[in-house]
Image: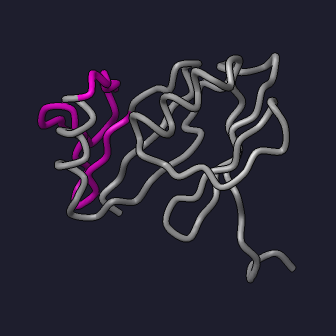
Amino acid sequence: MLGGKNVMATIAVKDVDAAARFYEGTLGLERVGTGSSEAIVYTSGHSWLLVYRSRYAGTNRATAATWVLGEDLEDAVQALRAKGVAFEHYDLPDTTRKGDVHVAGRVRIAWLKDPDGNIIALSSE
């Protein structure tokens, strides 16, 4: 039923303006719409991301969104680090770390948090 339809990631935030500075200024997403002062829609590749105000913002302790960057992963990590982004480091089974990038076989992944603590992943696959 839903397998052939597009899906949009949604991320809850406390402060929509702070989130806009992060998602636009730091991550470089393009704003394509606002429903109100409570939500912003971004485009990223062929996908959309909805950032909306919620009193439950920052309560998710799992990855909220993943960008698949392929061979551009390390360059993106360096560029974000240059903008002051701190990356998360996790002790995961069968995983090593090279700088801020976790390596598990051929998969490379780095995690960061938005201003509300939502976890974002950058992956090679």
Tell me if residue 77 comes above or below residue 113 in the rendering: below
Residue 111 percent across, percent down from the top left:
38, 35
Which residue sits at x=31%, y=26%? 87
Asked if the stretch drawn in magenta spans residue 103, the answer is yes
Residue 96 percent across, percent down from the top left:
18, 38
Residue 1 percent across, percent down from the top left:
87, 80
Please tell me in which quadrant of the rendered image residue 43 appears: bottom right
Which residue sits at x=63%, y=23%? 17
Of residues 15 and 74, which is closer to you in this image?
A: 15
Q: How many numbered dots are placed on residues in this image?
A: 0
Q: Which residues are magenta?
A: 83-111
Quadrant where the C terminus sits is bottom left
Which residue sits at x=22%, y=46%? 103
Tell me if residue 9 comes above or below residue 77 in the rendering: below
Is residue 35 found left or right of 57 in the rendered image?
A: right
Of residues 108 and 114, which is closer to you in this image?
A: 114
Which residue sits at x=59%, y=39%? 64
